[in-house]
Every structure is written in structure tokens, then in C-alpha cells.
Image (cartoon, helix red, strand yellow):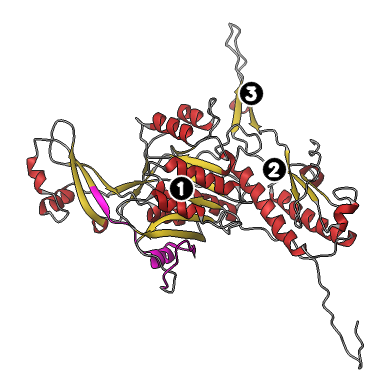
Amino acid sequence: MGNQQFPGVYVEEIPRMPVVTPAVTCLPLFIGYTAKVTDLSGRGLSSGERMPIASLAEFERCFGQGPRETLRLMLDVHGQIVTREGYSPFYLHACVQQYFANGGGLCEILSLGAFPDAPDEAAFSSAIGQLPVSPSFTMVAMPDAVSLPALPQLQQQLLAYCQQQTNCLAILDIPYCNHTTLTTTVDDFRKQIGDRYLRYGAAFLPWLEVINPGMQSMAHLEIKYTPGVANAWSQYHKATKLQSSLLRKRLQESPGNIHRMIPPCGTIMGLFQANARNIGIWKTPTSAEIQGIRSLSVSIHDQQQETLNVDPQTGKSINAIRRFSGRGIRLWGGRTLAGNDSESRYITATLTTGFIKASLEQYLSAHRFAPNDTNMWAAIRQSVETFLQTLWRNGALQGNKPEQAFFVRLGLDQTMTAADVAAGRILIDVGFALARPAEFTILKLQHQLATDQPLPVQSADNVVFQVRKKKVRAQTSPINVAINPILPTTASKPRSLESS
């Protein structure tokens, strides 16, 4: 220690190596239109400025209420209201509401401005083009673009942006479809989305039916009739305004809520963020019942999901939201668009890989000007191994032992040459084996045909049913990550992990 001049207790702080701090997981960005554009203090936000919010109340304080909607009524031959629906081409407010209803926490909002007459393609394209490099958000959706004819081009632009980031996934909405238009809508989406950067996006359907707040949000009225009665109820043509006493009377005579269909992106991102916070980013959020929705635009059955999950022509997987008897409505799929990619097929694999890479890059940036010697290499190796071992213990990596789950290589004549050391380069090889979801559970049953021989009488306790339940996992291979925090260089790829 220093030059002490009198008796006493002296304390000297010794700098310690920083540990690997986990990067942000499942932080969504919503892009769309709002009623106003301010921060929590009332200051107007500049163009392209993102605003973090942590609740629906904060959203409405900064961005206002949802858009004014059109009330669409369908009348039958008796003049009774068959359906009552709200419609608007702006879905951001409703999707954010669903996000928080399903466990979402902190998120970011990028407002394109106050509600115009209709969404504008150029505004979305410009907003995507101005998104930052190495952003804080890790998931991004643009629900207000779903009705635009240029939606496929905007989604391709968003996929290209996510591909350039370390840790970002595009959550894509598919245009509205019902039982009649499901097949055509899916085919068109797969054809128009293209074939590039599919591992950086995931698509979901069908749309969700939510309960509208009520008449106070309505600005226009549309009345339609069931087939064959368009001329039978001419008196309803008088009800051309929402203030019509006749309309109010009919609404009172036919009680019920006003419903609205919205795309599922906000709900999906809420489920993933809550799941990452409570369980882990490496798990698919299929255990939680979806909250806040009344119905689905399409009731998808097993055969339909088979064609959505695996498409033999394009390989582009689409995830389904389904209703199950006694279990409610749930997300029943977790694949990226890259359905034929064995390493990037699952959303959890893409998110976990991005999370690990972002965490390690964040950690290694602290050593950008550290001494390039054996002590530094040992400290880095220990910190990275500790981080990966924690993930393994939590179930993110597969393997019975740590050495089967990951490896970290760093050092002279392992990953670096003398020339690399002299040039100030630190080269690290990191490999890890991701745990992948068991999508299919196979139940094999055996039975024996009755014979003429009398069967021995057995008590119920002695009857044995030959049933085997087998969980099938996709074969997992390690994903090797080479990280160079100093200068870009070409490093030899590490050998794959040996199977256990």
C-alpha cells in the first residue's frame, strides 16, 4: 500500500474485472400514428424521436387516445342489429393496449404524427430508414401499415434493417382474413414477402376481436343489410348520423358490445416480454392464455395449422393463434419465417442468439483499451464462461455438463497469432448449444384383439395399459460466435461441439 504515516486501518480499493451483464431482452418498438406527440412533460417530440413508456396511462399521456372510428352495423329482415363493429385503419393504440394487457412492460413508441386521413407508405419507409444502428429495442412492429398496398415492400425493408442489427426481430402482421380468404391471404403473403432475411422476422395470424370502448369513440356510421332486404327497411336510411334517435333506439333494443378486429403484433410482443421476464427468453410463451380478446377472425384447426407451420414450397412458417376448449385462446407456434433453416427456425433460438451476442459485445467493449496479455485473456474467459454457465443452469443451453453446452477459446496459438497480439486484436471463439422446443409429442398405443379364449378376470388395480409417451426434440447443433471487439479480422471457425 501507500506510505502510511501513523497507526490505523487503511483500505485500498482494488479494481476488479467487470462481469458480463445481460443485454436487454424483448424490448418492443411500435411504429404508427397517434393523436398527439409529446413526452411525459408535455414537450413536443421531434421527428424520428422514440419515447419509452411503461404503461397504457403513460402512452395516453404522451400520445393521446385512439382514433375516431366508423360504426358498422348489419341489420336483418326484422330490423334487428346482427353485428356491430368499429373500424379504423389505425391500430397502434389498440395494439399497445393489448401489449400491456398481456404482460408487456417497458416499450418504445415512434409516432409518425397525428392521425391523417389514411396511413402513408412514405412515412413508414422514411421512419424505418432513420432507425438507429445498435438500437435499444429488440423487437419492432408497425401495425398501422397493415392495410397499405405497399405492406410487403415495407416489411422487406424492416427485415433488412433487423438483419443489420445484433439483436432485433421484426414482428410481422398479415392482412385481415376470414375463413373464406385464409388460404389466399397466406399464399399472397408468402409470395410477396420475398426470400431474404427470413430468419429476422416472424409472422402471426389471425386477427383478434377486442371490445371497443363504446359510442364515444365513433365518428362515422355505416349501415348494411343482410342479403335480400336492402329495400325492405328504407326507414333506416334516415339513420345517417350517429346522433340519430332511431339508431340509439335500435342499439338499446339489441344490447351488446361494439367489437373491433385488430392485428396481433402487440399481443404477441406482450406475451414474449412477459415470458422472458418471468421464465426466460429461450422459452416459447404458449402457456399463458391471451387476455383481452373476445374471438378470432379465423378458427384454425389442426390441418390448417399443418400448412401454416410447414410449407413444402417456400418453407415460410406462419404462427397460429388458436382457441382450445377449456384452455382459452393461446399462441400455438414459435417459428421465424425461415422454416427450412435448421438453426434459425425458432423464434427462441433467434432471440437467444441475439441476446448472447449483444451481452458479450457489451461486455467486451469495456476491454477495448485493456492490456492484451494472458491475465486479460484469463479474466475474459472466466467472465464469459460464468455467463454461459448461468444460462445453462437456467435451461437456455442443452447438455448434461457445461462442457457439452458451451465452450470459450481465447489465447495465443488458440485463436490469435503473435501478429494479432502485436496489432492489439483479441479474438474469441464462443460456441453454445441452444435448447430447442419439443414441438411434437408422440403417443404410441398398443392393443390386443380379443380371442375365443376366456380372459382371466383382473381387478381394476391389475389392469395394465401399454402406453408410451415420447417427447421428440429437434437435433441441436452448436452455434459458434466469433467476436472481435477491436478491429474486424478473419478468424478460423471453431470446431462444432461434440455431441454428448
Q: Name the residue under label 3.
A: 466
Amino acid type, label 3: Gln
Measure the C-alpha gap from mark 3 to mark 1: 44 Å
Residue at point 92% right, 93% down? 5
- How many numbered discs sit on the rendered protein? 3
Q: Is mark 3 on a helix, strand or loop?
A: loop
- Point out the stretch of residues depicted in magenta: 43-71
Precedes in sequence: disc 3 or disc 1 = 1
Q: Nearer the viewer, mark 3 or mark 1?
A: 1
Q: Name the residue under label 1.
A: 265
Residue at the (61%, 57%) spot, across then down: 134
Is disc 1 surrounded by few (<14), some (14 to 19) or many (20+) residues within 10 Å? many
Disc on the earlier residue, 1 or 2: 1
Task: Classify 410 as above or below 17.
Answer: above
- Tell me the quadrant of the picture where the C terminus can be found: top right
Residue position for label 2 = 434
Pointer 2 local density, CA inside 10 Å: few below 14, some 14–19, many at least 20: many
At x 71%, y 51%, the residue is: 391
On whether residue 153 falls in the magenta region, the answer is: no
Q: Where is residue 456 in the image (x, y as percent from the top left)?
A: 62, 15
Residue 32: x and y in percent read 41, 55
| Quadrant that contains the N terminus | bottom right
Query: What amino acid is found at the position of numbered circle 2 in the picture?
Result: Leu
The answer to whether residue 445 is left or right of residue 372 is left
Q: Mark 3: give few (<14), some (14-19) or many (20+) Cα within 10 Å.
A: few
